[in-house]
Amino acid sequence: MWAELTSKPLFIGILNLTPDSFSDGGRFLAPEAALAQAHALVAAGAGMLDLGAESTRPGAAPVSAAMEWARLEPVLAVLGEQLPAIPLSLDTRHADVASRGLSAGVAVLNDVTGFSDPSMLELARSRTCGLIAMRSRRKGADFHMPPYDDPAPRDAEAAIRELCVVRDRLLDAGIARDRVLLDPGFGFGTTFLEDLALWQTLPRLPEALAWPLERFCLGISRKRFLAARAGTPSLPPGQRDRLTSEAHAEARQLDYRVFRTHAIG
């Protein structure tokens, strides 16, 4: 799936089909609005679109698989008609939704829980689609989100070990390496100091994971990490696109190539 990755960056445009996204708060929940945003992202340079219908922001309420699919189905149908050349990624942690998405033409499954659910892992194993597997931390059924401004010193080693677990989970299931992109999971269970350490580890991350540099996906768009790093932690998510672009440029200097993002530019 990812064999076509070259020195040219791939921007995966984020299309939130939720009423409670941290970044755009339901602006694209209606299919017409979602379609317009999809066209805008592609016109700006997105080579893939990533659709998500369940918010994973801190404190977000879980969504049933039926509701998730009800939000996705009409948008998937119209994107297949109007943007047939643009591959689609589905951001979901539910196997039923993922299976329906694949049947509707989705090319990539993006699981923020790193395919930790056995049914998601089996679905990934039994298909040939591309996979984006993210590191995250859970507390029971919910995501573990500690106070982001916790001043306790942190390094990146715990996050790297967790990313190794995600990598090994997929490889041990017999999934080919060339199907997988690994996402370090900035902000998912990490504090600012841990995210900062993880960002500063990017030069050695491929060696630490024995993983090709071109098969990492960095999802830092509009994250609070960027605002905190810039010394403006109260900057609203919608005003963080310049910081996102600057961070992408930093990562591209290190030859990272795949970025999941709300805006391209």
Image: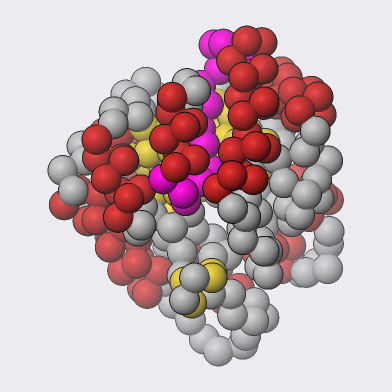
* Residue drawn at point x = 49 percent, y = 23 percent: 104
Quadrant occupied by the C terminus: top right
Mark yes or no: residue 99 visible: yes
Viewer-proximal residue among 265 and 21: 21
Q: In this view, does 260 lie to the left or right of 43?
A: left
* Residue drawn at point x = 52 percent, y = 86 percent: 153
Return the x and y of residue 201 as percentages of the image width and height: 42, 62
Q: In this view, does 25 lie to the left or right of 225?
A: right
94 part of magenta stretch: yes
Viewer-proximal residue among 247 and 253: 247
Return the x and y of residue 256 as percentages of the image width and height: 45, 41
Which residue occupies the extreme front position in the image? Answer: 66
* Residue drawn at point x = 37 percent, y = 32 percent: 130
Mark yes or no: residue 246 visible: no
179 part of magenta stretch: no
Find the magenta span and give its range.
83-95
- Image-quadrant location for residue 114: bottom left
* Residue drawn at point x = 81 percent, y = 24 percent: 32
Quadrant occupied by the N terminus: top left
Q: In this view, does 241 lie to the left or right of 93?
A: right
Which residue occupies the extreme bottom position in the image? Answer: 152
Return the x and y of residue 188 as percentages of the image width and height: 54, 65
Chief secondary structure of the magenta portion? loop
